[in-house]
Amino acid sequence: MKESIALMWRRLPERYKLIGSACENCKTHYFPPRSICPKCRRKGKISRFEYSGEGKVYSFTEISAGPIGFEHQTPYVIAIIELAEGAKCLGQIVDARLADVKIGDPVEGTFRKIQSDDPEGPIHYGFKFRLKK
Amino acid sequence: MSGIVGYGAYVPKYRIKSETIAEVWGEDPDRIKEGLGILEKAVPAIDEDATTLAVEAARIAMKRAGIPRDSIGALYVGSESHPYAVKPTACAVAQALGAVPNLTAADLEFACKAGTAGIQMCMGMVDSKMIHYGMAIGSDTAQGRPGDALEYSAAAGAAAYIIGPNDESMAILEDTLSYTTDTPDFWRRPKADFPSHGGRFTGPPAYFKHVMGAFYGLMQKMDEKVENYDYFVFHQPNAKFPQAVAKQLKIPKEKLADGLIVPIIGNTYSAASPLGLANVLDKAEPGQRIFMVSFGSGAGSDAFSIKVTDKIKNRDRAYPLSKFINEKEYLSYAIYSKLKGNYKGM
Ligand SMILES: [Zn+2]
């Protein structure tokens, strides 16, 4: 599924810098960013929050049949990462196979190509994670 | 005067051995290893390109410099493998660093010396107080035609340097000098997937003439000599060329060793001499002096005289280049070809 140029551009802060949001009222962190705190509703005070990229593996799996645009990248590991600042997010673990990863492994953020299968289209870049050694 | 306020180096995890490539083309692996002095080379992962390598190196440089990200006034990325023909690599790097929007940025191309050309540009801008800090990056995912001699050497890596005022620097850029001519030793036309080269013509009239020209030029300008330097870093398209230069200049082997990493990572093009310098800075002591000469086909060389300061003692040691060199995984030729996109219909 191709995303529009406008959507790609709007998501650059979130994809390049792991910018999410946090509620100043209840101190909950969100990623991807939210414009309303679901806990506090109208009392919530949402602001931009930049994650460090540090975190640990909460759960993971290996993809052996990738969706269109990712079929040549298989096999690759995707994981739910518990970010050090609180929120959880979904991301790929680079330079690793299933056997290399364990729940609880520390990771750090990295910057990779997400999708570039269209030779005349834009290259999509964004965050992924790397096992920290 | 300006200097190096921070630096970062990155090499991808994957390697292919020279003998793995030699086996495919029926070449004698020992002849390749002895002839080029390259044992293995670094290969980018399927989701890496010159932009992502540049971001990795730049983020380490920022961490080491410990400066605010919006203080970078100029950002130059030198590469011969910019992912786009039109759309600057430097913009994506600046955005990924959070250095946007108040900076000037551009991509540079000068075969293997575009990274050091960027360092010179930043030096001029810092010295003239046009900017406070500038970042120069050399980053490449070099391509060699399958079966060509370049296939054994064309590798991937990136090095980033933050140039700033000398009183904030861990190494002072004492002086620089360049030597440039029009020389058809190596080129790639638009839309060509692989570069072409002049075979043996890449030696005496290209590499040696320009490296020596810049070396003697700067030594004479500064009235300096080999004995006054602790380390030498030369562009390293293979191990043979820089070793021959060192021999001719009577540079002891141990002064060349730390800056000569091509045998274990290959020729990283724009990143080659900058990565050699990073490996030297990772162990250099205050007061030591480094002489670096880059080379880019086409052709030109930039020479630098560098003096390490006391600030080197406070450098962040979390991400030395050796960490990325030592964490490696070997590839088969089949998987290497896939990562390089060498299969039809991919
Ligand atoms: Zn809330």
Image: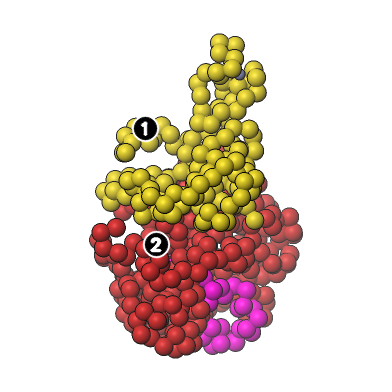
Chain colours: A yellow, B red
> Is B325 inside the magenta-drawn segment?
no
- Against B91, residue B271 (above or below) is below
- Secondary structure of residue under mark 1: helix
Q: Amino acid at mark 2?
A: Leu
Determine the residue positioned at 62% across, 83% down: B253
Q: Residues within 10 Å of mark 2 (few under 14, many from 20)?
A: many
Q: Give the residue at the far top of this rendering.
A: A42
B320 vs B125, left or right, is right
Residue found at x 64% / y 56%: A133
Q: Residue A11's x, y, as percent?
A: 43, 34
Q: Amino acid at mark 1?
A: Leu
The magenta segment? B243-270
Which percent across, then down, holds residue B203? Answer: 40, 83
Name the residue beneath numbered marker 2.
Answer: B339
Separation (CA) of disc 2 from disc 1: 28 Å
Q: Nearer the viewer, residue B173 or B16?
A: B16
Rendered image quadrant of residue B194: bottom left
Rendered position, B160 above or below A114: below
Q: Quadrant of residue B152?
A: bottom left
Helix, strand, or loop for circle 2?
A: helix
Binning the other alpha carbons within 10 Å of mark 1 as few (below 14), some (14 to 19) or many (20 upward) gives few
